[in-house]
Image (cartoon, rainbow, N blue to C red):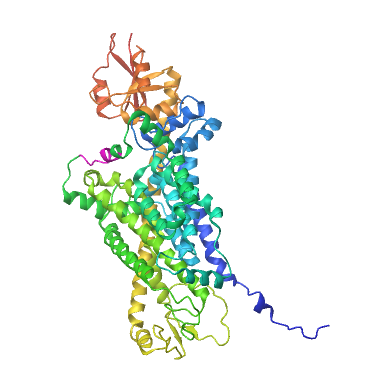
Amino acid sequence: MTAGVRQEPREATRPRTPRRTRLPALLALLVGLAGIGYRLALLLADAPPTNSDEATMGLAALHIARGEGFPVWFYGQAYMGTLEAYLAAPLIALAGPSVLVLRLPTLALYALFLALSWRLTRRLGGDRWFALLVVAVLALGSDRVVKNQLIAGGGYPELNPAGVTLALLTVSLCAGVPGARLPQRAAASGAAASGATAPGAAARLPRWAGWGLVSGLLLWADPLILPFVLALGAVLAACRRRELVGRAGAALAGGLLLGAAPMLLDSFRHGRDPLAAVLTASGADAAATWGERLHGGLVLGPPLAMGFCSPGRCAGWQLWWAPTFLVLLLLAAITAWRTLRRPLPPADPGHCPSAANDNFPRSGGDLAGAMERRVSAAVRLALLAGAAAVLAAYTATSAAGRTPVESARYLSVLAVATPALLWPLWSAAHRAGLWPRPAGPPHHPGALAKSDRSGHHRGELAGSDRPGCRQLGDSESISRTTGGRKRIRAAGVVAVAVLAGMLGTGAVATADAIGGVPATHAEADRHRALVDTLGALGVRHVRAGYWTCNRLTFASGEDVRCAVVDDELRPGFDRLPAYRRAVDADPDAAWVAPAGSPLAARLDARLGPGPGTLRMVEVPGWRIYLPRR
């Protein structure tokens, strides 16, 4: 019965994956949970500090939850969609208005960003250790970074996860698809060698529609992401241009129109131009010298945006990342471009029968891998182009020169390009043998190529005499391996030093942000005491400064309505004009001002015992002025 049955070792049919390959994934999970837990702890401690802009988004969510209105734009302007308000509305309907409830969706968006960044890093060719590094960098949370990620002030929390989603969809739609110059016979042989066929056009339609939907939602929420949308769209058009002419293009256009529908309908109805409004708000029409713009955009911008600065400032030693960022951006672009331009191997596996190197692999399966690497390089190049365009556009505005610290929030989308930006560092450390290597499949007897510790191939001197086929062991390759080993090692050491500097600088900035939490929590307690005191006094209408009004109204659930005044007691900018009408109609409307502010000093002058004067009720950190009758 057993005659003719060939017995093979179990490992020959079911190779085991070493346990150590699971370690980076487990560590990434723990690091990601630590990053999420850190941010949840900040939210429970009322950090980062809220403001009236975030409260305005909260009021929109409150109105949506009550069915009183469905705003398209941030109240008082014709740009920046209210996606965050719609995400928070169900929670506010259940738990009532609070800053914590308003921020829970932004925390979920951050968690999604971490998970998608891990996945994108893996899809772009990085191993699990490199993906762990990317997660670790993104888990750090300086003052500027956590503000961008957690404050529901409009636009910023949703941009990064949506941008990474677009990149993943682009890789998924282009994976296994030959470039514009690849002969179809090569594509066929690559698919056959890999043992799988590309998914049908019908199966890809949901992904096309999803790509369009995410793009439309991004353009409505905040057009800051537009450079990434255009760059990734160019990659998609290059690798699937024929398919775009048919149903795939219709699905993409339908998703795009659906996602951008609120913006488009409002623009058609009211003749508004959201892009022009964004340019005006960014300070494009204000004065700032080019020296100020370059300093704010290229020197302060990258360290602030990537989380390497202390709260509200950048120390001199923390600015090392500015030139490093620009150098990495250039090196990563060159690396991706070289990979993209590398010639594909012959379609016929027998064309180079004995060559086994990076340029001309031995099998059709390697051809499919070469095409995958080309797609990954194209997506990396698109992410880098998007980051460069965002940085250039920001530097060109006067906001970079006039308010560089606060306006660095416009660069929050640079985090989308983190896997592509760090690629040269990982590659250099990997080639030098300074980076943990994932366990690969076992080497089979008779394999020609082996890998030494430096990451270079060495093998027999056999090769092919056919034109265009390089021999694995030719003198040029051996010369590069022996003569360039020191340079490779030095580059790896520099790469590891830069990575260590990134993690160290980010950790210091994160610790500085944690140091400011007690003061933020104390200020939030004082504000809650203010709301409680107004309720106890029966005050329903007040006048206050811009940064007090909507925050007070949202915290009270609109039990207290507020009209904005400036320091001279003149009417200010009301994002909801209905509040001013309600306040003006109340002769007993009070005044609220922070203790020690210019507004408080102006109101102190009106204190007195007689009719028409004011009496003051003091709350820690605040002053309430009530009219005397």
Q: Position of residue 46 (x, y in %)?
A: 44, 39
Q: Which residue ends up furthest to the right in the rendered image?
A: 1
What residue appears at the point 49 percent right and 78 percent down from the top-left corner?
348
Q: Is residue 250 visible?
A: yes
Say left or right for 212 vs 281. Answer: right
Q: Which residue ends up furthest to the bottom in the rendered image?
A: 461
Q: Is residue 44 visible?
A: no
Q: Quadrant of residue 613?
A: top left
Magenta run includes residue 283: yes
Observer-nearest of 483 and 208 = 208
Observer-nearest of 496 and 168 = 168
**Above/below status of 351 relative to 343:** below
What residue appears at the point 25 percent right and 55 percent down from the top-left corner?
298
What residue appears at the point 28 percent right and 25 percent down from the top-left corner?
572
Quarter of the figure that contains the N terminus = bottom right
| First to last magenta residue range | 278-285
Q: Position of residue 229 (x, y in %)?
A: 38, 50
Quarter of the figure that contains the C terminus = top left
Say left or right for 160 vs 12. Answer: left
**Above/below status of 242 relative to 428:** above
Observer-nearest of 493 and 291 = 291
